[in-house]
Amino acid sequence: MPKMIVSIDGVVIKEVQLTKDRTTLGRRPYNDIVIDNLAVSGEHAVLQMTGNEVYLEDLNSTNGTYVNGKAVKKQLLQNNDAVEIGKYKIKYVNEAAGPTFERTVMMKAGAVPPPLAPAAQPAAAASPAIAAAADGAGLTAAIKVLSGAAAGRQVPLVKVVTTIGKPGVAVAAITKRPHGFVVAHVEGANRPTLNGAAIGAEAVTLKNGDLLELAGTQMQFVQA
């Protein structure tokens, strides 16, 4: 089944399976794929699936839609095509479409490339909303929720990338790297804080016992 892997600055933030004939993408919350960024139009583009083929069509967006660096109006996507919308990169994965001559992953050097495993199902509805974005190794750390409706809940960080927060308000991503975990701000005007200090543009290394606050919810990073 084809899917789209959304990333920003080399950090995977979501995977979306294409299960419908028409999948919309844009900034407005009613889209199937929501990207909350001012560079993205309210109704930016649409993915139309016919059989095993997926066409990407730009909906007269302000900043345009790019595939492999070229502006497109409507184009048939090929496995591993890299769609660019604003600062976001969206990798199209469709193994059933057949092999390609080159496998290109739009990621920064040193970043963890997205796997080709099925997308994880969202966690049970709670505050904060927590969803796994990519497969990783065994359990080595967890996020413990300290406040809000989900207080006391502990979320194991068993994925390469785990996103936390509330879409449209504030979202951060915790990424597992070979020598530890880092946290980065993904979207939203309200930046997360680490031990009381706002997280800037660069990812910050997490240490056991660190306190995170995001969208009014306090959490603690616990490493085994």
Image (spheres, rainbow, N blue to C red):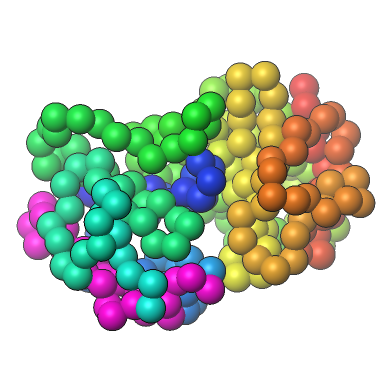
What residue sits 43% from the left and 80% below the top? 42
The residue lying furthest to the right in this view is: 196
What residue sits 60% from the left and 70% below the top? 168
The residue lying furthest to the front in this view is: 70
From which residue to which does the magenta span run? 38-61
Left or right, 76 with respect to 131, comes to left
What residue sits 69% from the left and 30% below the top? 181
Instruction: Pinpoint residue 188: horizontal percent, then vertical percent.
Output: 65, 66
Near-viewer residue (201 or 204): 201
Quarter of the figure with the C terminus: top right
Instruction: Pinpoint residue 128: horizontal percent, then vertical percent.
Output: 70, 59
Could you say which quadrant of the image residue 124 lies in? bottom right
Left or right, 98 with respect to 114, comes to left
Give the answer, above or below, for where 93 lies relative to 193. above
Instruction: Pinpoint residue 151: horizontal percent, then vertical percent.
Output: 81, 54
Can see residue 145? no
Left or right, 143 with respect to 137, comes to right
Whether the magenta-drawn stretch holds residue 51 is answered as yes
Instruction: Pinpoint residue 143: horizontal percent, then vertical percent.
Output: 74, 41
Could you say which quadrant of the image residue 211 lies in? top right
Whether the magenta-drawn stretch holds residue 15 is answered as no
Can see residue 147? yes
Give the answer, above or below, for where 42 lies relative to 71. below
What residue sits 78% from the left and 33% below the top? 206
Near-viewer residue (140 or 125): 140
In the rendered picture of this protein, how many numbered marks are placed on residues?
0
